[in-house]
Each structure stands twice: as C-alpha cells, then as structure tokens.
Image (cartoon, rainbow, N blue to C red):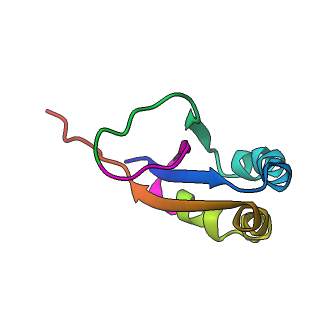
Amino acid sequence: MAKGYWIARVEITDPDVYATYVAANPAIFAKFGARFLVRGGPFEAPEGESRPRNVVIEFPDYATALACYRSPEYQENRKRRVASAVSDLMIIDGYDAPTG
C-alpha cells in the first residue's frame, strides 16, 4: 500500500506563536504514525515560487494522512499555524510502484 504525505511550504510571520504550533505537533503526529522526511533545511527552487520553509511528512497511507489533518487535535493546533504563518499544504497519495 502506498504511503500518504503532507507537503507544506511555509513562511513564518510570528515565530513565537509558530513555535507553540510546532511544540504541539509531535503528540498529534505520533497518534497517526507520521514521520518527518523533510523539516526545513537548505534548498534550491530552480523553477516556480517557493517559501522559506519546506516540510514533508510521511504517513502509513493516504487515508491516515487525511485523518490526521481532519482530527480535532490537529484542527485545534492548526489555528496556531494559520495565525503565525502563510502556508500551502497538500495531502497526497504516494506512488506504489508495480512489482515484477
């Protein structure tokens, strides 16, 4: 089964409030079996637009990635992100290559 992913591009506008958002996420993400693949770091954007921070989070599958986003815990914490950053978030089904 293919994994599910959150892909986010973020521009933090209020670092103090954003820090509270980040601090609350580990417990929420652990509940849904998520793990960070990309969390900031240097990057190049040779095409298109970008934001200063990029994040990729892997979930066991697409349904779990959606469930995490829709969960009451994340929706409550999301208010902090919305108040402290401009961001784009995509939830996407991973590619499960055929075998054989």
Residue at coordinates 75% horizontally, 53% vertically from top-left? 28
- State the count of labels: 0
45 with respect to 25 (left or right):
left
Q: Would residue 50 be counted in the magenta stretch?
A: yes
Q: Nearer the viewer, residue 37 or 39?
A: 39
Q: Which residue reaches farthest left?
A: 100
Q: Is residue 64 above or below residue 25?
A: below
| Image: 15 above or below 90 | above
Which residue does the image show at 48% across and 51% down from the upper left? 7
The residue that appears at 54% across and 57% down in the rendered structure is 65
The residue segment tinted magenta is 48-63
78 and 1: which is toward the camera: 78
Quadrant position of residue 34: top right
Q: Residue 62 at what x, y percent from top left?
A: 46, 58
Question: Relative to 96, is 30 on the left or the right?
Answer: right
Residue plotted at (72% across, 45% down): 30
Image spot of residue 73 (x, y percent): 78, 65
On whether residue 24 falls in the magenta region, the answer is no
From this viewpoint, which residue is outermost toward the top?
42
| Viewer-closest of 89 and 46 | 46
Q: Where's residue 41, x and y in %? A: 56, 29
Q: Is residue 55 left or right of residue 70?
A: left
Quarter occupied by residue 86: bottom right
In which quadrant will I find the C terminus?
Answer: top left
Q: Is 98 left or right of 95, judged from the image as shown?
A: left
